[in-house]
Amino acid sequence: MDKNKLKEALITLEKKHIDTAEMKYEDFLKGNLLDHSEVVDTDDQSHHRQSLDISDQLDEQAHVHTEHLEVINKISFEPTDVVKPGAVVSVNGRCIIVAVSKSPFKIGDRDFIGISTNAPIYNSLQGKKSGDSFEFNNHKFTIEAVN
């Protein structure tokens, strides 16, 4: 497995997420700004306050993905035999990338999921090697490979 290609794929995914979040934010703002040249009533102001909350959430999404991109760029994806940031871990047939939280995604024909070092399962995985077992949420897991 070429982990540099994996890192590039993660970077590409995050950039797409940033672009999408920014477009949603801009589109939302275009349709929800108050027109002060018209009469603004209490109902308009209430909707505007709700719109600001949604706007903040959309803006936050872009910031989260920007932070993810920074984390990915800082991590070494060099081969390793120990679970740590940058490791790809096969557990019970699933590939986990220790970098940032990421919903399931595909690279080539392989399925991956991303976890951050803040994920509760990472505490159970950290420092483990291929062949090690661990328990998480009352389930037993075996690490098949660490790369």
Image (cartoon, rainbow, N blue to C red):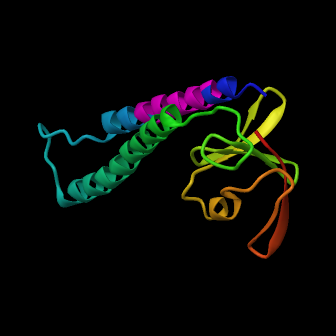
Relative side of 37 to 53, left or right = left
> What span is colored magenta in the figure?
8-23
Whether the magenta-drawn stretch holds residue 21 is answered as yes
| Residue lying at 59% horizontally and 44% vertically, measured from the top left | 99
| Front one among 82 and 13 | 82
Q: Residue at x 57, y 34 (%)?
A: 76
Q: Residue at x 29, y 51 (%)?
A: 52
> What residue appears at the point 76 percent right and 39 percent down from the top-left corner?
147
Q: Is residue 16 left or right of residue 26?
A: right
Q: Position of residue 61 (x, y in %)?
A: 44, 44
Q: Quadrant of the N terminus?
A: top right
Q: Quadrant of residue 78?
A: top right
Q: Is residue 55 left or right of residue 140?
A: left
Is 22 part of what is drawn in magenta? yes
List the single residue furthest toward the bottom.
138
Secondary structure mostly seen in the magenta stretch: helix
- Residue 40, position in %: x, y? 16, 50
The percent coordinates of residue 33 (x first, y second) are: 25, 40
